Amino acid sequence: MSSTQISANAVLDLIKQRRTYYPLSKDLGSLTTERINEIVKEALQHVPSSFNSQSNRVVVLLGAEHEKLWDITTETLKAIVPEDSFASTAGKMAMFKGAAGTILFFEDETVVKGMQEQFAVYADRFPVWAVQSDAMLQHTLWVALEAEGLGANLQHYNPLIDAKVAETWSIPESWKLNAQLVFGGKTGDAGEKAFGPVEEKFKTFGSA
């Protein structure tokens, strides 16, 4: 085994450590903006996509830009959540805003439509495959941030905030928002996680 190789157990250990953490702090330790962007770009380039279509798109928001996102989300929800129950929503938004950053995940619908036209026999599958690739990217970055000692939680305030997000950060019209990964310093432990019996979820046939 070369010095650049790692075992499957090392990868699986990181996957097991990845959990949902809230609330989060703005403390990123020694992690710089440049390092965060490097991690995101590397994942974006190397996560697989169907037919190598590369439909994933990402926007990283840090500092005041991250806070602006959650101000936008708060204002959007304030217009539709009943006033007598908005306090809990406002508290949740403040919690997200208190983190260090947010990664926005998009898929480029122009790419998806182009693949549908080029490979018409699979036209109905390309939107599904694009979502699957985006999900792989979300998980990869979540695990990578965990490996750097940070906590994160995944949110889905799309499509409610889509138009305002696009306007604020000049997002191309063809980019469809799928999820928001909030990250920052861990302020406590993750909650308990229950697991169903693996025997009910797994089958195997044959042998190596």
Image: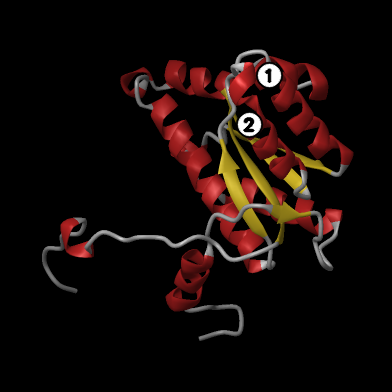
Label 2–label 1 contact, CB within 8 A = yes
Task: Answer with the quarter of the image where residue 31 lies.
Answer: bottom right
Q: Quadrant of residue 198?
A: bottom left
The residue located at (59%, 54%) in the rendering is: 142
Q: Which amino acid does the dot numbered 2 rest on?
A: Thr
Label 2 to label 1: alpha-carbon separation: 8 Å
**Where in the figure is residue 98, as x and y percent of width and height?**
77, 46
| Residue 129 visible, this orientation | yes
Q: Which residue is mark 1?
A: 78
Instruction: Work out whether residue 41 or residue 94 is closer to the camera in this orientation and state it.
Output: 94
Residue 166 is situated, as x and y percent measured from the top left of the image, at: 73, 19
Q: Position of residue 39 (x, y in %)?
A: 71, 56
Who comes first in sequence, dot 2 or dot 1? 1
State the residue position of label 2: 89
Front in this rendered view, residue 70 or 203: 70
Q: Is residue 29 left or right of residue 84?
A: right
Q: Residues within 10 Å of mark 1 (few under 14, many from 20)?
A: some
Instruction: Pinpoint residue 205: horizontal percent, then vertical percent.
Output: 11, 63
* Numbered tag placed on residue 37 in the rendering: none
The residue lying toward the viewer, choosing from 11 and 5, is 11
In this view of the protein, which residue sits in the foreground, 97 or 121?
97
Q: State the SS at label 2.
A: helix
